[in-house]
Amino acid sequence: MNVSETEVEILRLLKKSRHAYLSGQEISRRLGVSRSAVWKHIEALRKNGFSIEASPKKGYNLNAPTPFGASDILSELETELVGASIHYFKSIDSTNTKAAELAREGAGEGTCVIAESQSSGRGRLGRSWLSPAGVNLYTSIILRPKLAPNKAQSIALMAAVAVAGTIERYCKANNVTVKWPNDVMIDGRKAAGILIETSSDVDRIKYLILGIGVNLNMNTTEAPDELCDKIASIGCEGTRPVERSEFARRLYSSIEKWYKILLSSGSAPIIDVWRQHFDKEGKKVLIKGPPDVEGICMGVDEDGSLLIRTSDGKTRRVTSGDFVS
Ligand code: BTN
């Protein structure tokens, strides 16, 4: 669940003086809390899996890699909005469901939900999202953009750009592409999916849940047969396992950057970068509907809809569907 700010502050200090002891007195002085409060928070951190050595003379020392979770992410997060508050769950049905519940209760923009595993992870078009425990990133972010409901697709493209950019930091040698509208692929296999769910008035989005699943360290050979050769996992494509808290922080920073650009400058700069990752322009494509649409892909318009020139010479605007090829 939500973490205490003091706990995060203590973790931040311990991380800064890593491998050296920091006295309880020094921590209490820097944070303006009592030494017994420091001790209580250290105990809470230990319960959450942080290995903190204590020496009566020298103080506290964070002496092992830190476990994934809200405190770990927050202690090094440099965003203003995304991750302003993080709700962490060991296991949950769906982070999108939880985020929607929090949004209905009034949670602020930038509130994030993360989970180690999901029992009913959802994908687009009524599909499920494979969510094994402890290996990947499952997160949902509450956004409250002052946009008309029909502009939600531009948030999806914005998220794809942010996710692709973050993945590229781990897989430089690989080919990171986007599949319309917002799958992120490595060498043609899906590494990340994005699910946008909105609650809107007639002319305004009330809140939008941006759900993102990224395969980080899962062993794709253990996925069900039908998925095995269709999915990619970033840690397996790169040279070493991905540190999940670091990935989450980089992703949140990237989303914040592109979200601000979208709100201040519109979708054009987002579409430009999205197109650099899209390798189907000018190629024959098929979108499963209904209705199915087949033709030459002419790119996307400023709302993120796909433009397809069909055999009758007309250009069709496709707003939803399953991009088959
Ligand atoms: C897709 O490609 O079909 C979208 C997949 C989105 C999966 C993420 S995982 C975190 C969030 N919670 C969910 O239930 N779904 C999204």
Image (cartoon, rainbow, N blue to C red):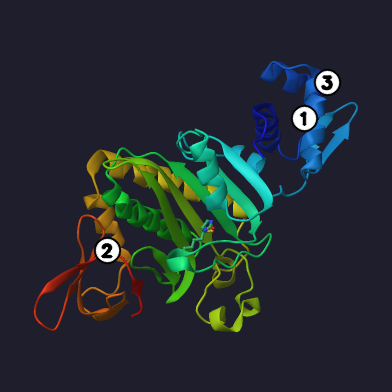
Pointer 3 and pointer 1: residues touching (CB < 8 Å)?
no
User: Where is the N terminus found, in terms of image quarters?
Assistant: top right
Disc 1 to disc 2, C-alpha distance? 50 Å
The answer to which image quadrant residue 146 occupies is: top left
Q: Is residue 127 left or right of residue 268?
A: right
The residue under the point 73% across, 17% down is: 33
Looking at the image, can residue 175 be seen? yes
User: Where is the C terminus found, in terms of image quarters?
Assistant: bottom left
Q: Nearer the viewer, mark 2 or mark 3?
A: 2
The answer to which image quadrant residue 224 occupies is: bottom right
Task: Classify mark 2: residues with Cα within 10 Å, few (<14), some (14-19) or many (20+).
Answer: some
The residue pinned by badge 3 equals 36
Disc 2 to disc 3, C-alpha distance? 58 Å
- Specify the farthest residue to the right: 56
The residue pinned by badge 1 equals 41
- Specify the farthest residue to the left: 313
The residue under the point 82% across, 26% down is: 39
Work out whether 311 lies above or below 71.
below
The residue pinned by badge 2 equals 319
Nearest the eye: 185 or 210: 210
Pointer 2 and pointer 3: residues touching (CB < 8 Å)?
no
The residue type indicated by label 2 comes to Thr
Q: Is residue 275 left or right of residue 231?
A: left
Disc 3 to disc 1, C-alpha distance? 9 Å
